């Protein structure tokens, strides 16, 4: 069915348009307007206050020759890929386990989900405490007699990003599990019956039949995980403040630090423009394919 | 039907909502190898998830001398509620020594209107997008989804300017608007998916009866969308309650939400770090969303099934 | 006294429009003083201000100036300014002043003769822009101090060092006794500040000024500064086992004798005081690391955003006067461990370390500090560099110095 065949199209669409004004305003004024404003000022040498004093690409040259920015990008890539993969894999596996007609499903589900109710600030604090080499996990294991046990990710530059990943997964996988579980519950029982009749092993059924059928769930999960990855900030601040040194810095923190701590808006805006650009390049084509362009038939 | 939905065999909302029982092969014997593996894995994973909570609770019940002894996993020898009392009512930030108590009510005052407004807007958006698609609607929606990926830090400055221009900077309404704006992308996505999965016939029948945009929304869509509203409420209550960045930038000290005070308490080190008070404060701050989750866990999964499964 | 007369007059005028307790004008004051010693100090301000018949609303933001300043600036540029706010005087608030968001205090300053009472005079320079005064300096903070735990050196069986070089020589003994030789917290400004102190102490005042005031990049890449980087390398090795973030936790390691010493500004003194320790007996302080005894005239100042409300504007004046009042100055600075901004107050109660500082001040061995000489942008780049340098043992001294010279070259 097509909307255009409806009577009084103009008037009714008008109503829908009126109802969508907050969305349109948000999209245009905040997201488009705010982004355009940011991009414009990234070409200026604004310091504490935005000023239209253009300096061309200077801020970008500086950005890409700053070691801290390069480390931030590298960290985001490592963190992003691992967090995406592990969230999806762990989330799916937990959901599949819970979907085996087990007892105490509610209890398990609640346990896996509760960290999601806690903020990143809280998550960061707890894990900072757990990973503290003196009295955290390392200290306790050493106290049990294993003196050479070493587990201090937050104080070791080369693995600190994994310490953050551990905390992030603890906080976020529960929600992904819920999404996956919901998806699994949407699969028709007949599919399982048919697979069993054909003698297909369970893992194969999951891999080749169930997962492809759950494409929409994976997409929603992907949106949620990916949006969280790009924005990762609070967790790092609470857990390591970017340390040791600058080993766990992330782009969002660079943006914030340079805009506000360093009082160099131009530099912060240049960094956020780079983030914006990568988001747009990856997301827009995909979002159009996924959500736009298609007419309801 | 939306062609996005055909990828799922159980294609109507009604069927899916009922089908929330466990699927998959049936279990055989209680102590089969499969069961041992299954429950073993689940229990080990559950321990990993519970460990931080355990440490938080245990630490918050210890006195400082006991904490200095070092083992964070050992249960308290002497249970004390002192840290809780201190965190709630007398921990200091600068000159203010009234703990988290003030922030609690501020958080309530911020969260309730923000949750209501953001959900009201997003549900109407989702409905308009799913059932009344007008020209250009998709473009706005795509912009909105892309908006979900923009780090908040990028938007702080433009929003400061916008709020200043409309005279709402520093006021509660300003913060409520900010929360509604940033909750919009994901919520709209959820509502849009949910409404597009509702049987088209319902909508058609209502149209034949002459119902208009708002008539259908209030009389047909709204009563049928309890599950997705539960999801939206849970997501927003947690999101807004836990927010730190907007709370600190767009409010002033007398309206600081609980998270800001938590940060102040945790970072105001007066001599030695009082881990027990910090942990108690942390749990207290997380209590509201935790309670919401524990009460509505089941509804949450069901609602997610309804809103997120369809793409 | 003129001052008392004024406050009395103010109390009357503010009391007129309203009756009863509503007469007190609430003034919100934001600052980042939240550690034990700091909070005790700021309480003195609040007490004195409340005594003028107004009311101090405390807007403390925890987590050091880096966290607090963005919030303050957003508030001011967002059109919801507080009544008064702390900044380190110098260039932090420069643009806010240029944009006309801050109140011009020149009239008040002329009336109360600030130029006569504030000592050393250079302090007011940090508050002055185009000949107008925009802030009230409240204390002098100098970074150039080394704080040593007497107990730690006793345990290690070596005498308490008298300067940086002896300290470095004593490091192995400390380490052998299971003591962290030097405590440097993880917050970036700490390692960057420690380097600046080494630059003045090891390199000398002229070296410091040539790098930061003249921004001589060639000099910064040269052999004079290389010596300083060598010292920073020593410091980094001595500090490698510190695993705390906050400066006062690092100070706490020294207080507890778990660390031998700390390079930190005189605000660390407040922490020793809160812990009940006595200078000379429990801890030793070496201004200028015992090598170059100077005091940098950095410090904290209060700025007053331009407000529309006449009542609040009056309260701002009352606060400005309170901050400079001799009695408040003494009470505040004793708790804070910093030096007062006026030379005519009696600091009888000052402890050994503060007296050392006052002596140096009296001799006129003062120099400007990075807050006055460098923009926040340059400061931040410096912080990034030195926090990386201190945390990454495999970063070579040469590489660090090269990057340092680059920062100096682009500094403004």
Image: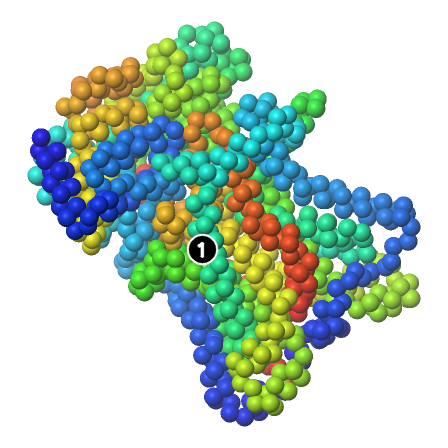
Residue B286 makes an appearance in the image: yes
Question: Is B303 on the left or on the right of B95, as rendered?
Answer: right
* Residue plotted at (47% across, 27% down): B272
- Depicted A183 relative to depicted C336: above or below: below
* Residue plotted at (81% across, 53% down): A102
Task: Sort mark 1 into few (<14), some (14-19) or many (20+) by Cα contacts within 10 Å.
Answer: some
The N terminus of chain A sits in image quarter: bottom right
Which element carries disc 1, helix, strand or loop?
helix
Where residue B195 sits, quadrant-wise, is bottom right
**Count of marks placed on residues:** 1
**Image x and y of residue B246, in percent:** 43, 53
Q: Nearer the viewer, residue C220 or B79?
A: B79
* Residue plotted at (39% across, 18% down): C276
The C terminus of chain A sits in image quarter: bottom right
Question: Is C163 on the left or on the right of C121, as rendered?
Answer: right
- Depicted A205 relative to depicted C260: above or below: below
**Image x and y of residue B285, in percent:** 52, 45
Q: Nearer the viewer, residue B245 or A266?
A: B245
Residue receiving disc 1: B109
């Amino acid at each position: 069915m097509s909307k255009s065949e409806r009577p009084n199209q103009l008037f009714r669409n008008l109503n829908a348009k009126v109802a969508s004004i907050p969305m349109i305003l948000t999209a245009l004024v905040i997201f488009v307007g705010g982004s355009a404003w940011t991009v414009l000022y990234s070409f200026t040498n604004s310091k504490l206050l935005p000023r239209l004093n253009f300096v061309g690409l200077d801020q970008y040259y500086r950005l890409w020759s700053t070691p801290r920015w390069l480390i931030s990008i590298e960290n985001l890539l490592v963190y992003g890929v691992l967090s995406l993969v592990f969230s999806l894999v762990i989330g799916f596996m937990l959901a599949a386990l819970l979907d085996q007609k087990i007892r105490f499903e509610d209890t398990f589900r609640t346990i896996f989900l509760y960290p999601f109710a806690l903020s990143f600030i809280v998550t960061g604090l707890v894990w900072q405490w757990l990973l503290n080499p003196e009295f955290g996990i390392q200290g306790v294991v050493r106290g049990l007699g294993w003196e050479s046990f070493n587990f201090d990710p937050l104080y070791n530059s080369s693995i600190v990003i994994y310490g953050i990943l551990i905390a992030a997964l603890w906080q976020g996988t529960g929600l992904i599990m819920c999404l996956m579980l919901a998806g699994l519950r949407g699969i028709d029982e007949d599919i399982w019956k048919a697979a069993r009749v054909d003698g297909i092993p369970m893992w194969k059924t999951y891999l080749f039949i169930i997962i492809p059928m759950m494409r929409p769930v994976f997409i929603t999960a992907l949106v949620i995980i990916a949006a969280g990855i790009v924005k990762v900030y609070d967790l790092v601040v609470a857990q390591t403040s970017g340390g040791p040194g600058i080993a766990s810095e992330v782009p969002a923190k660079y943006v914030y630090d340079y805009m506000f701590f360093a009082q160099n808006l131009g530099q912060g805006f240049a960094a956020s423009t780079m983030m914006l650009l990568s988001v747009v390049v990856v997301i827009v084509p995909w979002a159009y394919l996924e959500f736009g362009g298609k007419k309801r038939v | 039907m939306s062609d996005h939905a055909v990828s799922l065999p159980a294609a109507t909302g009604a069927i899916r909502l009922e089908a929330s029982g466990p699927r998959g092969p049936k279990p055989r014997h209680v102590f089969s190898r499969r069961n041992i593996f299954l429950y073993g894995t689940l229990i080990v994973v559950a321990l990993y998830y519970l460990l931080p909570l355990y440490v938080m609770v245990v630490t918050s019940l210890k006195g400082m001398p006991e904490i200095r002894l070092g083992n964070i996993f050992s249960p308290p020898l002497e249970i004390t509620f002192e840290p809780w009392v201190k965190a709630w009512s007398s921990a200091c930030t600068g000159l203010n020594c009234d703990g988290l108590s003030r922030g609690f009510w501020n958080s309530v005052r911020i969260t309730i209107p923000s949750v209501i407004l953001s959900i009201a807007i997003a549900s109407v958006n989702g409905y308009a997008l799913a059932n009344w698609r007008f020209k250009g609607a998709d473009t706005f929606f795509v912009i909105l989804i892309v908006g979900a990926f923009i780090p908040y830090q990028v938007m702080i400055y433009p929003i400061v300017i916008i709020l200043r221009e409309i005279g709402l900077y520093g006021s509660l309404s300003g913060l409520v608007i900010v929360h509604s704006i940033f909750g919009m992308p994901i919520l709209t996505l959820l509502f849009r998916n949910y409404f597009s999965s509702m049987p088209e016939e319902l909508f058609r029948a209502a149209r034949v009866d002459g119902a208009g945009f708002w008539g259908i929304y209030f009389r047909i869509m709204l009563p049928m969308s309890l599950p997705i509203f539960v999801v939206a409420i849970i997501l927003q209550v947690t999101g807004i309650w836990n927010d730190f960045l907007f709370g600190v930038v767009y409010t002033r000290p007398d309206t600081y939400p609980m998270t800001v005070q938590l940060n102040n308490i945790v970072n105001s080190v007066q001599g030695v770090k009082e881990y027990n008070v910090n942990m108690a404060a942390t749990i207290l701050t997380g209590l509201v969303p935790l309670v919401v989750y524990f009460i509505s866990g089941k509804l949450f999964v069901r609602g997610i099934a309804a809103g997120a499964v369809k793409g | 006294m003129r001052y008392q007369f004024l406050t009395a007059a103010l109390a009357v005028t503010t009391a007129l429009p309203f009756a009863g307790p509503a007469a007190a004008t609430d003034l919100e004051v934001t600052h980042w003083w939240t550690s034990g010693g700091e909070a005790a100090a700021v309480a003195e301000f609040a007490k004195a201000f409340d005594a003028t018949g107004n009311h101090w609303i405390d807007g403390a933001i925890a987590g050091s100036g880096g966290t607090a300043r963005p919030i303050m600036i957003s508030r001011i540029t967002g059109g919801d300014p507080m009544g008064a706010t702390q900044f380190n005087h110098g260039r932090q608030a420069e643009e806010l002043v240029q944009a006309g968001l801050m109140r011009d205090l020149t009239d008040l300053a002329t009336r109360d003769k600030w130029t006569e009472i504030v000592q050393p005079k250079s302090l007011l320079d940090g508050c002055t822009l185009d000949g107008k005064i925009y802030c009230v300096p409240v204390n002098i903070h100098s970074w150039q101090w080394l704080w040593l735990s007497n107990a730690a050196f006793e345990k290690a069986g070596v005498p308490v060092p008298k300067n940086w070089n002896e300290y470095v020589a004593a490091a192995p003994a400390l380490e052998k006794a299971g003591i962290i030789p030097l405590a440097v917290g993880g917050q970036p400004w700490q390692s960057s500040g420690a380097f600046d102190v080494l630059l003045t102490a090891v390199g000398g005042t002229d070296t410091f000024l040539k790098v930061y005031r003249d921004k001589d990049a060639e000099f910064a890449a040269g052999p004079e500064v290389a010596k300083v980087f060598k010292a920073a390398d020593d410091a980094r090795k001595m500090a490698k086992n510190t695993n705390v973030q906050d400066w006062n936790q690092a100070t706490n390691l020294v207080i507890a004798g778990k660390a031998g010493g700390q390079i930190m500004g005189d605000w660390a003194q407040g922490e020793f005081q809160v812990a009940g320790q006595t200078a000379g007996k429990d801890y030793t302080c070496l201004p200028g690391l015992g090598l170059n005894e100077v005091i940098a005239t950095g410090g904290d100042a209060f700025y007053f955003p331009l407000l529309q409300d006449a009542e609040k504007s009056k309260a701002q004046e009352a606060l400005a006067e309170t901050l400079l009042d001799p009695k408040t100055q003494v009470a505040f600075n004793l708790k804070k461990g910093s030096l007062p901004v006026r030379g005519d107050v009696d600091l009888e109660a000052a402890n050994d370390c503060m007296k050392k500082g006052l002596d140096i001040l009296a001799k006129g061995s003062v120099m400007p500090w990075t807050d006055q000489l460098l923009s926040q942008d340059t400061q931040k780049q410096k912080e990034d560099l030195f926090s990386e340098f201190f945390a990454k043992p495999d970063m070579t001294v040469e590489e660090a110095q090269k990057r340092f010279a680059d920062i100096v070259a682009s500094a403004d």
